Image (cartoon, coloured by chain):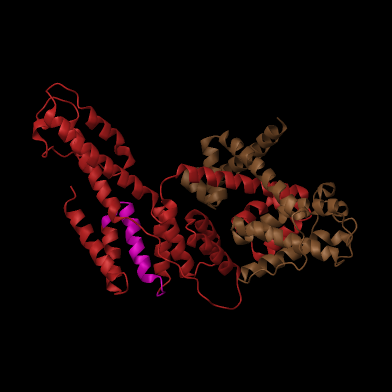
Amino acid sequence: MVKPRDPPEAPDSASGAGQIGVLDPAAEDHLARTFGPRIYVMALVRTRDPDAAHDLSQSALLEILLALRKGQLRDRQKLPGFVWGTARNVINYYLRGRTQAPGSEPLGAATPGANGAQVQDLERAERLALVRRAVARLEPGDQRILRMTLVDGWEPAEIAARLGLSSEVVRQRKSRAVKRVIEVVKDLSRS
Amino acid sequence: MQCEQVLRDEIAERYLRGALSAADQEAFEHHYFECASCFDELENLRLLRQALARGAAAGEAGSGARGGWAPWTWAAAAAVVALIAGGVYWRFVSSNRPSGVPNEPERRVAEQRPAAPVQPAPEAPSRQLPETASSAQPGPPSSTGAAQAAARSAALAALAVVKAPPYTPALLRGPLDEAERRFREAMRLYVARDYAGAKAGLRSAAALDRERPDIAFFLGICALLTDEPGVAIAELRRTIALGDSPYLEEAHFYLAKAHIRRGELAAAASQLKATVRLRGEREQEARELLQKLEAFRRTSP
């Protein structure tokens, strides 16, 4: 089912957990940096709670690393699916209102999950700052369309009716604005 | 799921809005756990959404919207305070002002007027301050009329004040469909007073199930609390149209509030009467509000 458009850009399962079951600290760190942000976003979308998403991503990474240390994954090509499935279970467990089971093996402050999370938080904050600068450069009308779409959850037809535009124009302006933001963020991050 | 489909169907955007089916959501998650480019796009959209939401929140800073009170009521309150303070000062200055001295304080009060909700300003003669009405000084007569209009707007704003009705989650066990899941997620935001966030979630839940009065009701409430009375009216009407439900009485009551917000006083009175007829918990509050509304209408020009 999963057919990435550009396989070379896919997370490097091999380097992320090249030696399944015998991960060295660098490999664990790589795994946390690769999948930690994905698990965070997944948890955020499912819980709509940034604090809970942060905690859940850490819990899920812990579970995954413990499972890998125990050799529970034999085929490294299945690592993304394994990570996703484990994260889904952790999040669903939380959503059912139960307390999360703590890991039986403490990983300590020097674990890749803990360090990786701090780095990811910093990177996320920096990237958000760039996005905000990029948004500020958009025309007010485009900002409004983006806000109505992404924040308020309006469909293009609803926005079109509200602003007196056609749905197609709304779609085009929204698409162009998103691309513009991404371009500006890239420029800003290079400078 | 393939990258082309993600782009073509705006899957990432819909995912962030909670507008995908459970199956599509999982398929997309599975996909972006393997696909760096799609995850990159998702992250860009998520941060963009976050930046826009913060920008909107900053624009409403100090509005008290997160406290359960509609932002515009604070603007009205500020206008009332400004009018009272300005009026007292103006009276003091007027009574002590030698002829020919410009009426600066009143001009300042007039400049603050746009903070009040928009309401037609009737041209009223200055009965309260005849000495200034007969004066050749610019300002006092028209300003008094404007002050009355602002006072009327503030009085109307007071009648339209909305406080978020409490929500207690139902402790029901059973199969969780997608609409219910989104409703619960949205109501978590509602309880946290994130009404804009809750509104987005409730919209997506309503898109999946148009027959749920609870979804329609709270969507209407969130629209009212985020200053979208038109949307609120549509959703609360839909709640009522769905028939008898635990939300029927409150739907009439809050629909009245939404009409007041838009200055549709006859429609508001009609909804308050409907609330009274149901003889529920809102009966007394509706009676009192109806009395105030009728008094307000009687004094309207």
Rendered image quadrant of residue B130: top left
The residue lying toward the viewer, choosing from B117 and A46, is A46
Q: Is residue B250 magenta?
A: yes
The shade of chain A is brown
Using the image as rendered, state which of residue A110 and residue A13 is in the foreground: A110
In-front residue for pair A124/A168: A124
Q: In this view of the protein, can residue B10 be seen by the observer?
A: no
Q: Position of residue A113 (x, y in %)?
A: 75, 55
**Is residue B199 in sight in this rendering?**
yes
| Magenta stretch encompasses residue B86 | no
Query: Horizontally, is A65 left or right of B299 in the view?
Result: right
Residue B207: percent from left, percent from top? 54, 62
**Residue B93 position (above or below residue B245):** above
Q: What color was chain B assigned in the picture? A: red
Looking at the image, which residue is at 51% across and 36% down?
A: A140
Q: Image check: B15 left or right of A68?
A: left
Considering the image in quadrants, where does the N terminus of chain B appear?
A: bottom right
The magenta stretch is B244-265
Count of numbered tags? 0
Question: In the rendered view, does B236 fall on the left or right side of B27?
Answer: left
Position of B248 relative to B115 (above/below)? below
Q: Residue at x 66, y 70 (%)?
A: A93
Residue B117 lies, with reference to residue B190, above or below; the image says: above
Image-based side of B187 in relation to A28, left or right: left
Magenta: main secondary structure equals: helix
Q: Position of residue B300 (x, y in %)?
A: 19, 50
